[in-house]
Image (cartoon, rainbow, N blue to C red):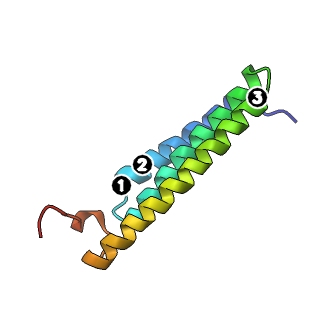
Amino acid sequence: MIIPLGHILIFAAALFVIGIYGTLVRRNIIGILLSIELILNAANVNLVAFSRSTSLEPATGQIFAIFVITLAAATAVVGLAIVLALFRTRKTILTDEMDLLKW
């Protein structure tokens, strides 16, 4: 069964909108990082879908998706390290209480 490109794009758009909503609404830094991962996954779905439908070599989109997943993992590691450092100094991970310019 072949899924039409339109359905895949609607799914990716829904993932993207959920990620944007989570990024803008969440107060917890870890929730914001997870929402950013959703946005990157929506981009991956788009890469693979367009590669499958337009490219002569379908593996091109999958290679780009693996590259984006690798970058997302590195970003998550750096983000979680920053969250851990902030938690050690501030004892909270809520973004409303993160005013680093005020000591």
Q: Closest to the observer: 70 or 30?
A: 70
Q: From the top left corner, tell me how far across and down residue 62 is, in percent.
A: 72, 38
Instruction: Tell me which residue sits at (49%, 62%) in the image.
Output: 77
Q: CA distance from mark 2 to mark 1?
A: 6 Å
Crowd tier of the residue under label 1, counting other residues whose Cα lies within 10 Å: few below 14, some 14–19, many 20 or above: few
Q: Secondary structure at mark 2?
A: helix
Instruction: Tell me which residue sits at (62%, 40%) in the image.
Output: 44
Q: On the picture, is 37 further left or further right than 54?
A: left
Question: In the rendering, which numbered label is found on residue 52?
Answer: 3
Q: CA distance from mark 2 to mark 3?
A: 28 Å
Q: Amino acid at mark 1?
A: Val
Q: Secondary structure at mark 1?
A: helix
50 relative to 67, above or below? above
Q: Closest to the observer: 2 or 102?
A: 102
The residue where tag 1 is placed is 25
Q: On the picture, is 86 further left or further right than 75?
A: left
